[in-house]
Image (spheres, rainbow, N blue to C red):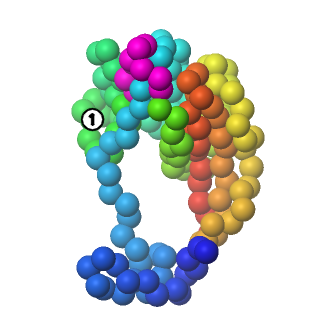
């Protein structure tokens, strides 16, 4: 069961949130994953995230991706190599600024060794509005998504 604009929910602080648009944004500091082959993941994530305006800020045995500017500021995304560890399987979704950026994410990720896991296109509506997304599997099989919402 999904929320719709106009639904009233009560936050953990006891305050009513009158609509989905009134809900505070989710805050997190960073997301990280372990990979087997850092070189393959470096190529994949650098290429796939570039159309979304996300760049590699640090490369020192692990990779730190974030907004351009040279200093990791939350939220950021970490890719670390541990050849002895079975990589965690995760699903991570990045916000795109346009459908063209979603298309470019998908094309760049495929060219950099990713596997198609859902071609760019409209997805079932998760209110509010339209959702356009694409899905790739990275070299370790993680499900990586880029999407844009519009009214």
53 over 140 or under it: above or below: below
Name the side, left or right, on which 121 lies relative to 44. Answer: right
Res. 31 image quadrant: top left
Q: Residue at x 42, y 32 (%)?
A: 33
Q: Is residue 36 above or below residue 65?
A: above
Quadrant of the frame with the C terminus:
bottom right
In the depicted view, which residue is nearer to us: 3 or 53? 3
Q: Position of residue 22 (x, y in %)?
A: 41, 78
Residue visible at 40% across and 74% down in the picture: 23
The secondary structure type at the circle numbered 1 is loop
**111 over 122 or under it: above or below:** above
* Residue under numbered circle 1: 72
Residue 51 can be seen in this image = no
Q: Residue 83 colored magenta? A: yes
Residue at the image point whose x is 43% and y is 83% from the top:
9
Question: Which segment is the magenta one?
Answer: 79-87
Task: State the image coordinates of residue 105 (x, y, percent, origin top left).
Answer: 61, 35
Per the picture, the main secondary structure of the magenta-coloured stretch is loop
Q: Is residue 129 left or right of residue 16?
A: right
Q: Report x, y in % for residue 55.
A: 42, 30
Q: Name the residue: 47% across, 32% down.
A: 88
Circle 1: is it few (<14), some (14-19), or many (20+) Cα within 10 Å? some
Q: Quadrant of residue 135?
A: top right
Q: Is residue 92 visible?
A: yes
Image quarter hosting the N terminus: bottom right
């Amino acid at each position: 069961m999904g929320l719709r604009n106009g639904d009233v929910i009560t936050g953990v602080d006891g305050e009513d949130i009158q609509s989905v648009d009134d809900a505070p944004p989710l805050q997190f500091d960073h997301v990280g994953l372990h990979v087997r082959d850092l070189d393959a993941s470096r190529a994949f994530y650098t290429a796939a995230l570039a159309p979304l305006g996300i760049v590699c800020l640090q490369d020192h045995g692990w990779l730190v991706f974030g907004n351009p500017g040279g200093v990791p500021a939350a939220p950021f995304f970490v890719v670390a190599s541990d050849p002895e560890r079975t990589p965690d399987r995760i699903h991570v979704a990045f916000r795109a600024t346009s459908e063209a950026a979603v298309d470019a994410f998908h094309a760049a990720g495929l060219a950099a060794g990713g596997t198609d896991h859902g071609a760019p296109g409209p997805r079932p509506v998760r209110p509010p509005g339209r959702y356009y997304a694409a899905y790739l599997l990275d070299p370790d099989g993680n499900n990586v998504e880029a999407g844009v919402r519009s009214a």
